[in-house]
C-alpha cells in the first residue's frame, strides 16, 4: 500500500527549476532514501510533502490525502524533522516534549511507548536547555518531538548531518525499530553508508530522479570494471588517466582514484601504459558502490 505518492511534481524559485516532473511512490513501513548533493531539490520536495509549500505542477498524496487540499489532515498524521534544528533552544528537553505534545492534542505519557527507547537516553538530562545539548542529543530530542503524536509517516531531511558516527549509528538503529512498528520513513542523507540501510533509494540531481532501486540493485547496475588506484603524486596520476582512451572515467574518492574502464579494455593494458609513463601505482579491483553509480548517472545526464 502506497503511503506517499508523487506524480509529476515540478517547482520553480524564480528562474531556478528546483523540481522537474518527479514521480515515485513509498510503500507502508518502508525506509525510502533520497540521495543527492546540496541543491538537488530534496528539501523542496520535503516542504511540498509536509504541506509547507505548494507545487507549481503535479500532484502528491500522503496517506491518500492531497497536499493541495488536505493539509490539516496530513499535518496531524506525519512527523517532520527539517534539516536545521528547529526546536526551542530556551526550553528544556522535557518542556519541548510537552509543548509539541500539547500542539497535537496529546500528552507525553500517552505516547511514551513509541519514544521510550530514545527518551530513556535523554531522561537524565531532561531539565537541560535544548540549546545546551550536543548534536547527537539534539537529534534524538527532535526525533522524539516528531514522534510524540504517533505519526504514520516520518519525514527526515538530512537528520544526521554534523552528528558524530556513534550517534549516527544509534539513530539508524532507532529508524529500523520505527519501521518494524509500521511507520513509513522518507529520509534524505548525504552519507552513502546510510543510503545502504534504506529499503530503496532514489538518486536525485537538479530536481530530477535518475534512478530508483534497492541499494544492492543500484550497486549491481554499474556497467564497468572498477579499479581503485593510488600513487605518490595523485594529481598527476589523475591527469594522466584522463588522457587515456581506454579510461571511461576517473575521479578522486577519499585517498584513492576510482577508475572505470571502457568495455573491452583490460586492467593489465592500463597498468602497462602507466608504468611506461613513469607511474608506480597501488591498485585493486573493487565493487561499485552507490556513489560510483551516482557519478556514472550524472555523466550520462551531462552527455545527453
Image (cartoon, grey):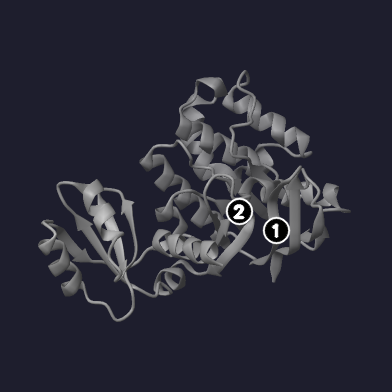
Q: Nearer the viewer, residue 201 or 241?
A: 241
- Residue at the farthest right position: 69
Q: Which mark is residue 300?
A: none
Q: Which residue does the numbered mark 2 point to in the structure image?
A: 206
Dot 1 falls on a residue whose secondary structure is strand
Q: Find residue 50 and report its horizontal and vertical position in percent.
A: 73, 48
Which image quadrant for residue 278? Answer: bottom left
Between the C-alphas of marks 1 and 2, the distance is 8 Å
Q: Residues within 10 Å of mark 1 (few under 14, many from 20)?
A: some
What x and y, as percent, mark residue 48? Answer: 74, 49
Residue 88 in picture, x, y percent from top left: 64, 24
Quadrant of the image containing the N terminus: bottom right
User: Who is closer to the viewer here, 147 or 159?
Assistant: 159
123 to the left or right of 61: left
- The answer to whether 47 is drawn above or below residue 273 in the figure is above
Q: Quadrant of the C terminus?
A: bottom right
Q: Residues within 10 Å of mark 2 (few under 14, many from 20)?
A: some
Outermost bottom residue: 264
The residue to which callout 1 is attached is 20
Task: Give left or right: position of 75 versus 263.
Answer: right
The spot of residue 166 in percent (x, y) is 36, 41
The reply to whether dot 1 and dot 2 touch (C-beta < 8 Å) is yes
Residue at the image position 44 percent from the left and 50 percent from the top = 191
Name the foreground residue: 274 vs 72: 274
Which secondary structure, mark 2?
Answer: loop
Amino acid at each position: 500500500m502506497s503511503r506517499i505518492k508523487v506524480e509529476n511534481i515540478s517547482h520553480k524559485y524564480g528562474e531556478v527549476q528546483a523540481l522537474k516532473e518527479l514521480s515515485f511512490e513509498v510503500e507502508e513501513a518502508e525506509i525510502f532514501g533520497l540521495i543527492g548533493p546540496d541543491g538537488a531539490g530534496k528539501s523542496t520536495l520535503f516542504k511540498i510533502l509536509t504541506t509547507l509549500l505548494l507545487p507549481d505542477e503535479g500532484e502528491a498524496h500522503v496517506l491518500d490525502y492531497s497536499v493541495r487540499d488536505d493539509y490539516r489532515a496530513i499535518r496531524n498524521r506525519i512527523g517532520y524533522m527539517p534539516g536545521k534544528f528547529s526546536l526551542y533552544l530556551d526550553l528544556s528537553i522535557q518542556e519541548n516534549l510537552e509543548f509539541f505534545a500539547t500542539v497535537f492534542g496529546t500528552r507525553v505519557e500517552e505516547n511514551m511507548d513509541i519514544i521510550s527507547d530514545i527518551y530513556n537516553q535523554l531522561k537524565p538530562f531532561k531539565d537541560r536547555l535544548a540549546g545546551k545539548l550536543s548534536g547527537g542529543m539534539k537529534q534524538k530530542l527532535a526525533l522524539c518531538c516528531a514522534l510524540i503524536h504517533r505519526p504514520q509517516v516520518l519525514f527526515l531531511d538530512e537528520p544526521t548531518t554534523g552528528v558524530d558516527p556513534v550517534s549516527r549509528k544509534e539513530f539508524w538503529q532507532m529508524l529500523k525499530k520505527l519501521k518494524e512498528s509500521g511507520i513509513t520513513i522518507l529520509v534524505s542523507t548525504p552519507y552513502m553508508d546510510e543510503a545502504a540501510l534504506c529499503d530503496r533509494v532514489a538518486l536525485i540531481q537538479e530536481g530530477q530522479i535518475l534512478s530508483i532501486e534497492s541499494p544492492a540493485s543500484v550497486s549491481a547496475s554499474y556497467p564497468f570494471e572498477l579499479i581503485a588506484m593510488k600513487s605518490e603524486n595523485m594529481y598527476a596520476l589523475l591527469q594522466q588517466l584522463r588522457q587515456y582512451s581506454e579510461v571511461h572515467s576517473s575521479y578522486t574518492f577519499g585517498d584513492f582514484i576510482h577508475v572505470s574502464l571502457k568495455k573491452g579494455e583490460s586492467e593489465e593494458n592500463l597498468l602497462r601504459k602507466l608504468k611506461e609513463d613513469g607511474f608506480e601505482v597501488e591498485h585493486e579491483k573493487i565493487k561499485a558502490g552507490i556513489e560510483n553509480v551516482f557519478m556514472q548517472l550524472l555523466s550520462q545526464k551531462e552527455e545527453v
